[in-house]
Amino acid sequence: MPTPSTAPPVARDAPPVPVLGFALAWISFCVLLTTVGVQDYLRQGGTDLWKPVLWDGSSLLVASLIAWAQWRRATHLDALLSQPWRWFGRSLAGLPLIAPLFVALVFALRHGVYALLELRYQHEPWGVVFRYEMLKFAMFYLMFTAVVFGLRSYAALSQAQLRLSHERALAQEARLLQLTQQIEPHFLFNAINTVAATIEPNPALAERLLTQLASLLRATTDLARSPQTCLDDELRLLRAYAAIMCQRFADRVDLRFDIAPGLDACVVPTLVLQPLLENAFRHGVERRTEMTTVVVRASRHADRLRLEVQDDAGQLTAKPTEGVGLGNLRQRLLARYGALASLSVQAVPQGGVLAVIELPCAC
């Protein structure tokens, strides 16, 4: 029997971020900067291509290590994403120490490679180098930090929306289950009244009906624990209910089922047809002594499932009012399907009442 879908649990730790996409973007950025550096070097008359590759490569290597460390550290600051100033303050707190460390490591790599090649790496005085390189790194670090903030904020927002959607789905399932379970006392009350009406005129029939009613209520209780079920289970329960009613009105009702083939697995709200059939008996069969024909139909039209209960005895008042059963059913259809489902009750020109439910066909 189909059960209501349950949204998967939502992680409540660090929000997911597009790590692979960011890594590919970072690699592309490094390749672009290196390419630009090589082209500038060639335009200035340089001939040793390894030099611009080393210069830019050493900077990008150290910057990548620092960026990776900053990325890892940013996962611990997600609680401050709603307070940007505090988030940026914590993220940039180490910049005065990281910037000179970056310059020292980059130039240590360059000097080391040159020394291995028995060459001397010449550059401007260290004071000028540190001021210029630290300023460049600070600009890079600020830009990178802003990108990290944007990515993690977007991921946190997406996670919050996913969690909200999950909670709404759970709330809707809870409401649907509550509405479904509200049918049980209403159904029990009407069923007991049906049996009670036979006790005095026919005690033997009342005893048989009580036995059948006990089995039916057990099945109803099990089925009502889920807001939806398959049409096959719904019809099985409906036939059990109809058997009780037909025994009481054995000489006054002709009940027929007209179910199109291939619909057994279609998902429908639990106890969707029982209120309609109950109304046909209460407002049609019980109110007259002549034979009443009641027909239960199920058919599929494209992607729509159409369920009908029609009798040739019921009458609609000028301003019909819905009872507990129909009112509850209408609320359940609205909560589950919104405007995609409908419930209508209309008079039949040749006499009687036709109740129709249309909903999306999920088979």
Image (tube, rainbow, N blue to C red):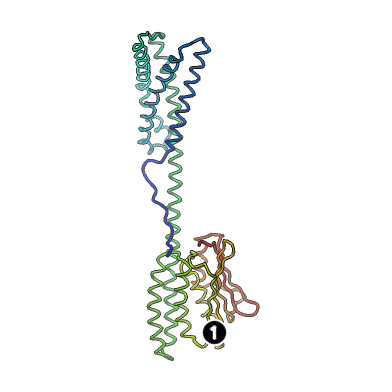
The amino acid type found where label 1 is placed reads Arg
Horizontal side of 27 relative to 254 (left or right) equals: left
Residue 137 in the image: state x and y as whole percent.
42, 21
Secondary structure, mark 1, is loop
Q: Residue furthest right?
A: 349
Q: Residue 42: x percent and y percent?
A: 51, 13
| Residue at 41% in and 30% down | 88
* Residue 91 or residue 305, whichever sits in front: 305
Most extreme residue toward the bottom is 201
Q: Quadrant of residue 151?
A: top left
Q: Residue at x 44, y 64 (%)?
A: 227
100 is higher (above) or lower (below) than 282: above
In percent of width and height, residue 292 lies at 56, 83
Quadrant for the N terminus, please: bottom left
Note whether 43 is above or below 268 in the view shown.
above
**Residue at the spot of label 1:** 287
At x 46%, y 51%, the residue is 165
Residue 15: percent from the left, percent from the top?
40, 41
- Above-or-below relation of 6 to 149: below
Q: Total number of numbered labels?
A: 1
Circle 1: is it few (<14), some (14-19), or many (20+) Cα within 10 Å? few
Identify whether 323 is placed above or below 166: below
- Residue 144, picture quadrant: top left
Left or right of residue 208, residue 328 in this image: right
